[in-house]
Structure formats: structure tokens, C-alpha cells
Amino acid sequence: MLTLGAMTAAVAASATTADDVTETTAPITRVASVVGADSDGVVAGPVPAGPAAAGPVDAGSEGDPGPLGDLGLIFNRPKPTQARQRQALPTATHTVSPPLRSITMAFTGDFLPHTKVYRTAGELAADTPGRDHDFRPYLEPIRPLVESADWAVCHMEVNLSADGTRLSSYPVFRAPGQLAFDAAEIGYDSCSLASNHILDKGIDGVAETISVFDDADLAYTGAARSAEEAESQIWLDVNGVKVAHLSYAYGFNGFQIPAEVPWTSNLIDETNILARAEQARSDGADFVILSLHWGEEYRHQPSAYQRDLGPRLLASPDVDLIVGHHAHVVQPVDRLDGEWLIYGLGNLLSGQGQLPRRDELLVEVTIDEQPDGSFAAGDLTVAPLYLDARTLTVHPSNPTTRPLDIEPGLAAELDASWSRVNAVLETGTGFDTLKLG
């Protein structure tokens, strides 16, 4: 079972009862001034003295005691014009600071649809007018996890077709554009695009892919059609928090970016990354995220390159979170000086049927405002996932939260996947502070 280290116990809120409060009331006959300070250090100023607490008692109209004689002096009440007046006390002003803000962002692994994936999606759309493919059934079980975040980010590793034709799989991918629309419908808000397959269909393929994202109203980073777009695309407004999301890849499978369009995508270069992160911070970024397509395929443990470069980048004051992709298997999560380095999330939707390539991870990071107005990564919640090879459906594998009506054979696979992911996460320095989702 996935323990994720020692889980923090809930703290019961204490309550103050009425017996704990003593209220003291003293008669006020005359107020000259108020001396002292309230809890915020605001000192109340002097109050002008008011009239005497009570004026002379009227003996009755024209001084006649009336039929009751002297007893009328006792039972008569002051006339309205003689009613007691009390000087109003000044109200102390309190400066109330707005509450500190907090947002959540979710990240998942690679969209890498092989032939089997998009062909089956085509069959699922056969009875749906206006659709050439339907990827929603594959992702429906994780919809609640994706939608629960303030902002959800996918990783699209392939080019997309605007009309659902000219599709291809390994080694040069082009998937149906409907995938971007379905990702948005499931709850994704943006995707990182820099990967070793982004140039599979050349510069025109990049432009077509981005046009699909535009039509799907899905934000993106890591590939661009112009220098201006390369700069503007990094900005996300997450509930008023200004987030910069940078996306880089280790290479493009031998394809080269033409010199006249250098903004097409981003190669991992430490100097360039740090300079761009610094510029983003200077331009007002509250939080800077770095997505890296890196590492060695099918290896759970980060490569020496990842172990060397990752901590160095995260040590920059201008990089707040690193999210890794490409290995197609889950890799560990490190916590370094309070910041998260997620080496690899595995796949999300692919035709790679081998185990453990169907073990996957969704993470949700809480980003908290600090008293000085800056933002920092807080809790990291992990939700292990599993791709069912028979139906290509992605399931949460957590035995305590997944549906109870899962058929026994699949339940056993989910349990085994859960254990494998747990074993990988245990090797990361962040394991003991991870939360379970």
C-alpha cells in the first residue's frame, strides 16, 4: 500500500465558550477622555466632556406638585427635552490585511497516441455527429482530479491534425486534433509542447498544431509561430496569480529548427533557461514553472544529466517548480530547499502496452502567497494512475478512493500498479512530505 510517509494528523480547532468571557459594565456619568491603545496600536484621542449625567428634576408643570403633593417629586419623569445625553465615543480604525492567496495546479504525463489509440477513438465517434474521434471515454475516470485543480496542464508530445486526416504514429506522429478539444472538455487549461516529436511534421506541422490549440481554446507553451507568440504564450493568469510557464526539450530526433525561425521550439540550454526565467520574474511573474522533456526512456531513476541539471536550475531564485516528461515511466520526486523537482510523470494516453509504461502519475501542487507578497510551492499531492490496455482507459489506482464496482481483474492490476509507483516514489527525497490524492 502507498503510505507516502508520515501523514499529517488533522488539528482540531479550539473554541472559546461563553464561560471564558467576563463582561464588565460600569455606569458612565461623564466622559472626559479615553487613554490607551487597541490591539493594532491605534490610540484613541481625547473626547470632549459632555454634560452632567443627569439634570435637575422637574417638580411638575409651573412648579405645582399636583394632587399627590410632595410624592409627585418622586414619581415624575423628565420631559423629553430634559432626557439624558451621552457624548459618542470615537471609533478606532483597524487596518485589515487581505487574506493570503492560494492556487492549485495539476500536471499529468504524455499524450502520445499511437495508431491503436486514435483508431479506437475513431470507432468510439462513429455514432456521434460532428466528431471524427472521441478520446473522452479514455479520460473520463480522471475528470474529477483534473477539474478539481484551479489550472490543469497536460503534455502534448505530438503534432495534431486540424481535419482529423493524414494521421501517423511512431516514429513521426500526427494525431487527430480532436484530442486537444477533448482534453479541454475533460478540464485541462493548457499544455506544454516542447518535446522530441514537436518537429515531426516540420514547421507547418507546428503551425497546424498551434492552430488546433487556438480553436480548442487551450493555452500552450513550448512551440510558437512567431517571436512575439513565443514570449506571450508563457503567461497564465490563475485566479489573479501571474504564472510563467516555460517548456524545453532535450532534442528533436534529428530534426533542426531553421535559423530564420528560432522561436519554433526550445532546446534545453541552462544559460538560456535561467536568463528567460529571470526575465519572467522581472516582468512580474509571481511563480515560474519549468517543464523539461528529458531523461532516459523507460528508466525509473533519473539520469546523471537530470540529477546534475535539475537541482542547479531549481536553485535559481527565478525557478519555482520543475515538471519532467519523456521517460514514459514514473520517476521520483525530490524536495530541495522546500521546492519540488518532479523528474517524470510517465505517460497519460499512449499505445505503449508494456509494463510499467502504463503506470502513471498526476500531481497537484499548491502555490501559496507568503506574507511578503511572494509565492512559493506548498503541498504536493500525488495521484497514481493506470492505463487499462484493453480499453485504453486511464484509472486512478488509489484503493481508498477509486470506485468500488471495478471488476476484480482490473482491481488487481490497479493494486499492482499502485505498489510499483509507490516503490519508485519512495526513492525520492520528497517522499515523506508527499500527500495522497
Image (tube, rainbow, N blue to C red):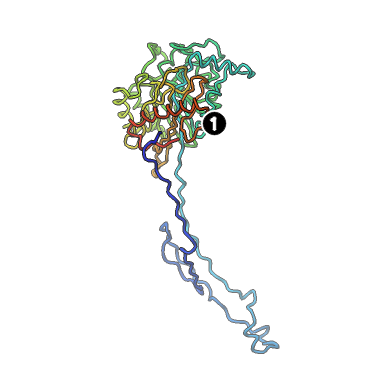
Q: Residue at x 53, y 10 (%)?
A: 166
Tell me the SS state at disc 1: loop
Crowding near pointer 1: few (<14 within 10 Å), some, many (20+)? few
Q: Residue furthest front?
A: 408
Q: Residue at x 64, y 87 (%)?
A: 71
Q: Residue furthest right?
A: 67
For residue 101, say whether it is visible.
yes
Q: Position of residue 378 (x, y in %)?
A: 40, 38
Quadrant of the rendered image containing residue 303 = top left
Q: Position of residue 191 (x, y in %)?
A: 47, 25
Q: Which residue is label 1 attached to?
A: 405
Q: Position of residue 423 (x, y in %)?
A: 36, 29
**Lateral position of residue 405 relative to residue 314, left or right:** right
- In the foreground, 199 or 173: 173
Q: Is residue 57 above or below residue 344?
A: below
- In the foreground, 337 or 397: 397
**Lateral position of residue 177 relative to residue 200, left or right:** right
Q: Is residue 27 above or below residue 283?
A: below
